[in-house]
Image: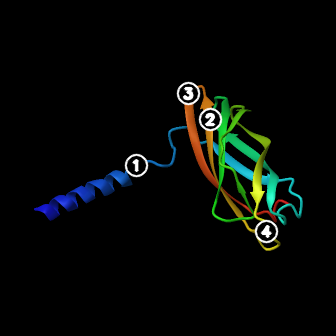
Amino acid sequence: MKSAVCFLTLGLFLVACGSSNLSSNSGPNVNVHLAQVNTAPDIFYFSGPVNIQYQLSIANPTSDPLTLTRLDLETVGPGAYSLRTAATPMNLKVPPNSTASYTISVWGRARGGYLTADEPVTLRATAFFKGTSGSFVRLFTENISPLASR
């Protein structure tokens, strides 16, 4: 009897976890993309603070204007550099049925070293949007290659 209750509880737990929706599908299908730009060829050879620029592209397929109100960036795992994880407030407008591109600048910390300067960096990003029909969040991951941005 006790084992049946344990299996039933475990089964209910697995069903509850399996039905959770972690992919923020509550908002419109807005695509967000980051690409590293304007990087000097030897910027990551020395350890310490570095200024990193990204081209932020936002595709708004809806008929409503959107505003990017906040962008959270963090690095996942090792790479040529790491970013601080503080939230970045923004006020970037994206017109309806269009794509907008912005250049953003963030501070990171280079690991330093000839071999680690070209290691790829994985970014986990959270974009907070506000539109006429409410607010929503987009989660995305980018794999940045420092070599490709030179």
**Amino acid at the residue labelled 4:** Asp
Instruction: Indicate the position of residue 119 as horizontal and vertical percent values.
Output: 74, 68
Residue beneath disc 1: 20
**CA–CA distance in space, label 3 to label 1:** 23 Å
Task: Sort mark 2 into few (<14), some (14-19) or many (20+) by Cα contacts within 10 Å.
Answer: many
Of the image marks 3 and 4, the number of the one nearer the N terminus: 4
**Amino acid at the residue labelled 3:** Ser
Q: Mark 1 and mark 2 in contact? Answer it, CB < 8 Å.
A: no
- The residue closer to the viewer here, 24 or 45, is 45
Task: Sort mark 1 into few (<14), some (14-19) or many (20+) by Cα contacts within 10 Å.
Answer: few
**CA–CA distance in space, label 1 to label 2:** 22 Å
Instruction: Indicate the position of residue 106 as horizontal and vertical percent values.
Output: 77, 47
Residue 118 is marked as: 4
Q: Mark 3 and mark 4 in contact? Answer it, CB < 8 Å.
A: no
Q: Residue at x 65, y 37 (%)?
A: 70
**CA–CA distance in space, label 3 to label 2:** 11 Å
In the image as oriented, which residue stretches furthest toward the front?
A: 48
Helix, strand or loop under label 1: loop
Helix, strand or loop under label 3: loop
**Amino acid at the residue labelled 1:** Ser
**Amino acid at the residue labelled 2:** Phe
Q: Mark 3 and mark 1 in contact? Answer it, CB < 8 Å.
A: no
Residue 28 appears in the figure: no
Residue beneath disc 2: 129
Q: Mark 4 and mark 2 in contact? Answer it, CB < 8 Å.
A: no
Instruction: Indicate the position of residue 19 as horizontal and vertical percent values.
Output: 37, 50
Rendered view: 112 above or below 20: below
**Quick one: quadrant of the N terminus?**
bottom left
Residue beneath disc 3: 133
Q: Which residue is drawn at 75% across and 53% down?
A: 108
Task: Sort mark 4 into few (<14), some (14-19) or many (20+) by Cα contacts within 10 Å.
Answer: many
Rendered view: 106 above or below 3: above
